[in-house]
Amino acid sequence: EFKLLSMVKQIDFVLQKRIAGTPLESMSIHLNDTLHGGLEVQIGAQKFETIDDVPDPNIQSAIRAAIAEWETRYIPGA
């Protein structure tokens, strides 16, 4: 169930729905949890420690939009 997923995996779920059917879908973009409770961006075989480290501004925008949607839809009182 969605609520049982980590925050990062919930945001990744939103991201996957947002990029479905777009050119970004084929780039295999995923958000992963790190061992220290952070977020890691994976694009194909490449991994980035922060969203700002991602070189493609379109991917950065897609991730930020997914985070904003997650905050609006899944955080009570937001």
Image: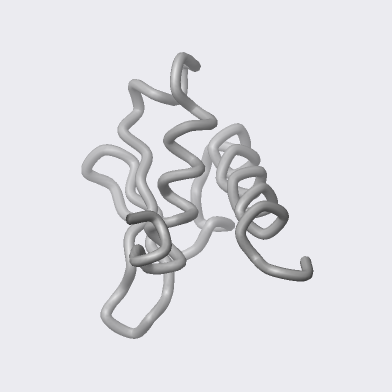
Locate the N terminus and report the quarter of the image it occupies: bottom left
Q: Which is nearer the eye, 14 or 50?
A: 14
Residue situated furthest front in the rendering: 1
Residue name at image x 61 percent, y 53 percent = 70
User: With respect to residue 12, does 16 lie above or below?
Assistant: above
Locate the C terminus and report the quarter of the image it occupies: bottom right
Residue name at image x 60 percent, y 32 percent = 58
Describe residue 7's horizontal placement relative to residue 71 as left or right.
Answer: left
Q: How many marks?
A: 0
Q: Which is nearer the eye, 7 or 53?
A: 7
Residue name at image x 31 percent, y 33 percent = 28
Residue name at image x 49 percent, y 63 percent = 50
How far across and down, in percent of the image, does residue 43 sit? 34, 41
How far across and down, in percent of the image, does residue 16 sit? 42, 36
- Residue 9 visible to the viewer: yes
- Residue 48 visible to the viewer: no
How far across and down, in percent of the image, does residue 17 sit? 47, 32
How far across and down, in percent of the image, does residue 35 sit? 27, 80
Q: Which is nearer the eye, 34 or 20?
A: 20
